[in-house]
Amino acid sequence: MPLDQAPIQGYDPRTGEPAGEPVPATPAKQVNRTVLAAQTAFAAWRAFDRAAALEAIAAALDEHADELVALADRETALGVPRLTGEVARTTGQLRLFAGVLRDGLYQGTLIEHADGPRPDLRRVNRPLGPVAVFAASNFPFAFSVAGGDTASALAAGCPVIVKAHEAHPRTSLRTAELVKAALAEVGAPEGVFDLVFGFEAGVRLVQHPGITGVGFTGSTRGGLALAKLCAERPDPIPFYGELGSVNPVFVLPGALAERGAEIATGYAGSLTMGSGQFCTNPGIMFVPEDAGLLDAIADAVSGTVGAPMLAERIHSGLVAGLEELAAIPGVRLVAEGKPGEGPWAPTPAVYAVSAEDFRANAERLREEHFGPVGLIVTYVPGTGTEPSHLLRQGSVGEGHLTSTIHLDADNAADVAAARELLPELERIAGRIVFNGWPTGVAVTHAQHHGGPFPATTAPAHTSVGAAAIRRWFVPVVYQDAPAELLPAVLRDESAFQSG
Amino acid sequence: MPLDQAPIQGYDPRTGEPAGEPVPATPAKQVNRTVLAAQTAFAAWRAFDRAAALEAIAAALDEHADELVALADRETALGVPRLTGEVARTTGQLRLFAGVLRDGLYQGTLIEHADGPRPDLRRVNRPLGPVAVFAASNFPFAFSVAGGDTASALAAGCPVIVKAHEAHPRTSLRTAELVKAALAEVGAPEGVFDLVFGFEAGVRLVQHPGITGVGFTGSTRGGLALAKLCAERPDPIPFYGELGSVNPVFVLPGALAERGAEIATGYAGSLTMGSGQFCTNPGIMFVPEDAGLLDAIADAVSGTVGAPMLAERIHSGLVAGLEELAAIPGVRLVAEGKPGEGPWAPTPAVYAVSAEDFRANAERLREEHFGPVGLIVTYVPGTGTEPSHLLRQGSVGEGHLTSTIHLDADNAADVAAARELLPELERIAGRIVFNGWPTGVAVTHAQHHGGPFPATTAPAHTSVGAAAIRRWFVPVVYQDAPAELLPAVLRDESAFQSG
C-alpha cells in the first residue's frame, strides 16, 4: 500500500503514542461516490430549510461536547478548557450562519425594473455547487469538520465534502457522524455532507469535475500545491486558502513609556497561547530599543511552559526553523521558557535583532515559525529604522492576516507615527489591531480574516465571520423573466429586496 | 528588434492597408517607470475626489467624440453609429461609477461596537493598489483604454495602467491623451493613469511587483496565459479575465409555434451584429426540429452582409474554425449571407446539426467561433434529446456569460420545460435572458456579466455594471481603533454606515 493511502493514525501529543484505532484512507471509488452523492443532493439542499439544519448540527455538537472534547484532547492535547470553548465557538458559528440565512442579507438580491430600453434585471446569489473543505490541524473543531468553512458553505447552499486533517482522525470521524445524524434527523438530502481521509482522497476531490470550489486552512506549501491543482483543472475553480502570516506588531515609544510591563506580559501570553499554533500568532514585534522592555519580556517568557504541539511534524518543523533563525547574523536569544512535557513540546523562545540587521536579512527573518517563538526587532527612533521606514522599504513583507499597533492615544507623537503607519498596514494586512493582541478572532458580521498573499490566496474574502459565506456564491441575473419563473426572492413581493 | 517589440501598426479593416502611423512598443524601462509612478500616485488618488475626476474624463471624451469615432472607425470599421453609441456608453460608465462613489454603497462599511468580550470592529473596503487592464479588440471604447475595467478600478481608488489592444493603437493613444489631460486639469496625481503598447510590455506589467491585480477581456488562450503569469508570481495577484462564451439559446416548442418568424429574424440580427464580434454572440441555438423555422432562418441570414472584422488574425481564425466545424459528422450548412467588402469581411453562416449528432461531438461543436456564425441544434421533443437532457449530460458546456430561453409564457408546457431548464442554466451562465437576445448588455447596478470558466476566471465577479468595482477592493477591519485614527467613513458620525 502506498504511504499516501495508509490508514490515518492519531497520536497523543503528550506521549507521542498512537491514540485510538487508525481510520482507513478513503479509496478513490468512494471519493467519487461521495462527490456524485453531493451533486445529487445539491438541488434539494438549495431548496431546504438550511437554517434549521445548521441549528440541528449545532445542537448535536453541543449535546456531545464532553465526548468531543475528550476525543480531541487526546489527539491534540490542547486542553479541556480551550477545547470546550472551541466547541462553543463552532456551534456559535453554525448558529451565526443560520441567522445570516434568516436575515437574507447575503442573498445579494437587487431588482431593477425595466426602464425605457433597459430590460428588467434581477440579480441574486446562487451557491457554487459541491465544494471541498480541507480541515486545519490547529482548530480541531472551529476550522475542521464542522468549522467555519463547512458552516458557511452549507449555509450558502453548497454540499460539503471535508478532507479530515490527519492530526485528529477520531475527533473528525465522530464529529462527522454527529453532523450526518443531525442532518438525517431534519430530513436533509443524503450526501449533502461527507468526510474523506487521506492525501490521495484530498487530491482526487480537488481534481474531481463535480467539485466547484475549495476551502483550505493550512501551510503555505500545502495551500500552494492545492491552488495549483485548482488552476490546472480543465475548468479552473475558486480556491480559498488561508496560508501563512507572521502578524507584525509595532510598539510606539509612547506606549512603551506608558505600559511597557503590560505589553511584555501581554506579548508573552499571546505568543505562547495554544503552544503558539495560531495563524494570528505575533511572530515579529517591532519595539523601540529599550533594555527594560527586553528584560520584562525575558521575565514573562521565562515563566512560560511549552505545551505539546499537534504533531511530530509540526514540532520538528519548528525546531529546524529555529536553528536557521538563530544562525542569521545579529539574531540573539532573549529568553526561553520551560520545555513542556512529552516528545513534541517545544521550549518557548524569544529572539531579538536590531532593525539594521533585520533589514539586511528581512526575507529570511520574516519566515513564519509555527509555534511559541517570537522575534523582536529593536529600532531607534530618528535613525531611519522606524517601522514606517521598514514598511515602505518592503522589509516587513506584504501578506499578513493582522498587524497591530501599540500606542498611547494621548501621546501626539504616537498618534502621528500611527497615522504614518496606517496606509502601510492597510496594504499588508486585513485586520489592524490597536492596543491588543492578534490572537483571538471574533466571529461576527464585521470581522475580516484575510490578507494579501500568503495570508490568503483570495484577499477579498474572509474565512471567519458572516462574510465567509460570500466565497461560496456566484451571482446570476434574470433578464425579463416571467414572474412565475423567478426565484421567490426576486419577485416583486419578496421581503428580501436590498435595492 | 524582436517581433514582440515591433511598433504597433493599426490597419483599416475595409482595405487591410495600414491606417495611420505605427505606435512604438513601450520599452521595459518605461513600463517600470509607469508602475513606479502609479505606486507613487496611489495614496493621493485614494484621497482624491475621484467622482469629479471620472466626470471630467467623461466630459473630455464626449467633447471629442467625433474625433474619437473617426479614428476608431478607420481602425475597426465598426461604423459611425455603433461607435458613437459606444462612446456614449463609455462616458455613461464613467458617470455611473462617479455615482457609485457618491452614494458610498460599495465602500462596504460595517461598524460593530464593542460588546462584552467582543472588540469594536469596523470594516471598510480599500483599493488593491495599481492594477493592469488589458483592452479588448471588439470594443475600442467601452472595454478599452477608458472602458469599464479602467473606470471601475479608478473609481475603487486603484491607479490604472492599460495595455492597449493592437487592433486600434491610434484610437487608444488619443483616448489616453484625453484621459490624462482631463485628470491633469482636475489636479489628479500624476501617474494615476497610463497606457503601454506591445506584448512584452503587457507581460512585464503582469509580472511587476508593483501591480496588484489584472483585468482582461479577450481570448481564452490569451487569458489563460496571463492568469498563469499572475498565479506564478512570488506573490500571486487576482486575475479577472473575461474569456470565451458561446451563449446557448433554447427555443421551446410553444415559442416556436407562437412566433417562429420573429425568432428567426431576431436570431439573424443578434448573430451578425458587429460582424458577430461580441462575447455575448448567440453561438448555439437549440430549436425543436421544424423545417419552417430553418427556412425562415435561412431567409433571414441570406439577407445579411458580412462586415469587415477587426483584424486579419480574427478573420483567419474564424475561417479556420469554420473549416473544422463543417467537417464534423452531421453538420450541414443552412444558409450563408453575403460576403462583405474588403479582405477581412467574412460570410455570415448558419450551420445545423441534430441533437444526437451534437451530443456525439459536443466538445468540438461548442467551440467558440468569434464572428457572425451560428450552429443550430435541432431536437425532437419526447426523444430524450431536449435541452434539459443535453444540459444535464454536460453537452452544452459549463461556462457561458449568458443563456437564453424563448418560451410562450402562456403555454403551460413551455413554462414547465423552462422550470426544468432553469437550475441547469443558473449553473452554466451568469445571465439568463428570456424572450430576447444575449447581445446588448445593460450597464446598470443589477447587471452581472460573468459566468463559470471559461466565461470568466472569477465567476463571482462582473466586468459590466456597478458591481465591477468590487474586483478592485479588499476589506480591512479596524479593531479597537482610537476614533481619530479611523478612516472618516468608519467614525461613528459617518453618513455611510451600512450596518
Image (cartoon, coloured by chain):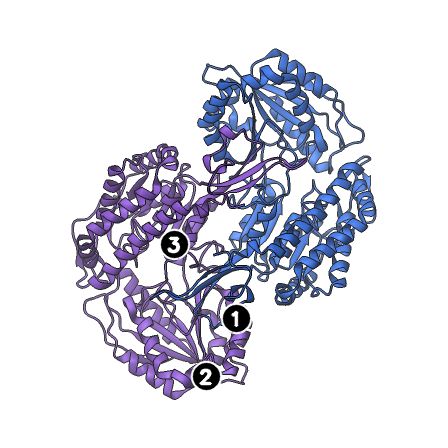
Chain colours: A blue, B purple
Percent across and percent down for residue A320 are 66, 29
- Is label 1 or label 3 in front? 1
Instruction: For residue B265, say whether it is visible.
Output: yes
Q: Is residue B342 above or below residue B28?
A: below
The residue wearing badge 1 is B422
**Same subunit, tags 2 and 3:** yes
Q: Left or right: where does residue A424 sit relative to residue A65?
A: left
Marks 1 and 3 sit apart, C-alpha to C-alpha, by 31 Å
* Sooner in the amino-acid sequence: mark 1 or mark 3: 3
Marks 2 and 3 sit apart, C-alpha to C-alpha, by 41 Å
Percent across and percent down for residue B378 are 44, 81
Marks 2 and 1 sit apart, C-alpha to C-alpha, by 17 Å
Q: Is residue B259 above or below residue A478?
A: below
Q: Nearer the viewer, residue A287 or B94?
A: B94
- Identify the secondary structure beneath mark 1: helix
* Sooner in the amino-acid sequence: mark 2 or mark 3: 3
Q: Nearer the viewer, residue B18 or B157?
A: B157
Give the crowd class for mark 3: few <14, some 14-19, many >=20 residues within 10 Å.
few
The residue wearing badge 2 is B254
The amino acid type, in three-letter code, at marker 3 is: Gly
* Sooner in the amino-acid sequence: mark 2 or mark 1: 2
Give the crowd class for mark 2: few <14, some 14-19, many >=20 residues within 10 Å.
many
